Image: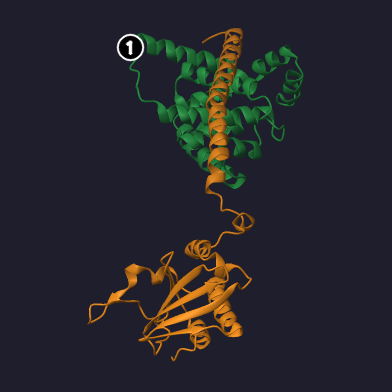
Chain colours: A green, B orange
Amino acid sequence: MDNGASSYRRFLDGDESAFDEIMKELFRSLVFFIDRYVHDVHAAEDIAIDAFSDLVVHRHRYNFKVSLKTYLFMIGRSRALDYIKHRKVINVAPLSEAQNLSDDEKTLEEIVLEDERKRKVNAAVSMLPEDMRAVIHLIYFEEMTYDEAAKVMKKNCKQVDNLLYRAKKELRIILGKDGELLL
Amino acid sequence: MRELNECKAEVFRRSDNRIKERKRSRNRILALCLPLCLVLTILSVTTLPAIMPVGEESLDGVTDDVSTNDFEANSSDVNSKENNCVSVTVSGNGSERTITDASSVENVFYQIHDILEANEGYMNSASNNNFIVNNSGECVPPVNEQYKPNNIEKYTITLMSSDGSEQVFELYGAVLDDVESEKKIMLTKEQLNKLTAALELLN
């Protein structure tokens, strides 16, 4: 599947089932990526639903110049940053709910990261600054090209390259001896 | 975390709501803009013609010299191009003369006629209000700043027509006064010279 472009074309032509395929392919990944920013699985899910809703409401904004995955992740990142900016109320959840939240995050991790190795890296990635987190996620977990990652993050390829280099450096420090093998 | 189907249903529910909201706001904008455009159109149709400058064609026959038209209305004899004047009596400076020579009478007639027609005088400036009182207490007309006639005597010019009717003018300095209509014309130097020459007055 070409990251959803052909499915989206079918959806635009009236095939509702094509949208199911897109959701199945990209929804959880998008939620996982947005969670990197907002640190709240339920909020990330909500934001991801809004991002997919954009695909339905503004059907002709996507011009097929980038992959659908890149386009969706661009929308997701933008909405996540808006959410962070407008978040005024800090929810203080009781410990029991916190356990549930972290369980949900674990569930999400299990769904998205089938690879055990990636799960180990994921734990370390959460300790990185926001931009580094995002670039590692896009390149390493989502397996995007530098070009696609640059479009999502609204940077150029050189900046992405620099970020990635610094992020890996930090990860090696965090992960220690095993870091080299994992990365 | 929700199931994928639940999320998909939520996606379409939110999309429908957003589409409906867009339609509603579009209708609201139209509902506001259409009456506004209508009002602006009506205003422009009613207001613009009033403030647009009038074309020159509509100004044909209208002149600034309103009083000349009034003067002409009261001096129909002199205004008529045909000379029906038979004599001109000039009195003033302690004397009175009557000009009966046809060519001289015609000359005086047409001088006054030309003055009225040319409207080179400044009727408004020669109104009664501009007259000044001299040391003797007499009300005298203002002197044209361009020239000072040598003769500031007052002359009465009476044009007698063939049917017996009269037209009386007064020449006081550089002002020609139609006695009947009480309209005054401030003469130019050239007009004054020609008139006084026709009347055989000394300048």
Looking at the image, which is closer to me, B142 or A27?
A: B142
Number of numbered markers: 1
Query: Can residue A113 be spotted in the picture?
Result: no
Q: Is residue B128 visible?
A: yes
What residue do we see at 51% from left, 42% from top?
A166
Q: What residue type is labelled 1?
A: Pro
Q: Quadrant of the N terminus of chain A?
A: top right
In the rendered image, the vertical position of residue B74 relative to residue B54, given as above or below: below
Return the chain for callout 1: A
- Residue at (65, 33) in percent of width and height: A144
Image quadrant where one finds the C terminus of chain A? top right
Between B185 and A7, the residue placed more toward the observer is B185
- Who is closer to the viewer here, B188 or A36? B188
| Position of residue A54 measured from the top left corner of the image (x, y, whole percent) | 60, 23
Q: Where is residue B122 in the image (x, y as percent from the top left)?
A: 45, 72
The residue drawn where x is 56% and y is 81% is B105
Q: Residues within 10 Å of mark 1 (few under 14, many from 20)?
A: few
> Helix, strand or loop at disc 1?
loop
In the image, is residue B186 above or below residue B152?
above
> Residue drawn 41% across and 28% down?
A86
**Depth check, front residue: B163 or B66:** B163
- Give how far across and how far down residue B156 sits, in percent: 42, 78
The residue pinned by badge 1 equals A94
Q: Position of residue A96 (x, y in %)?
A: 36, 8
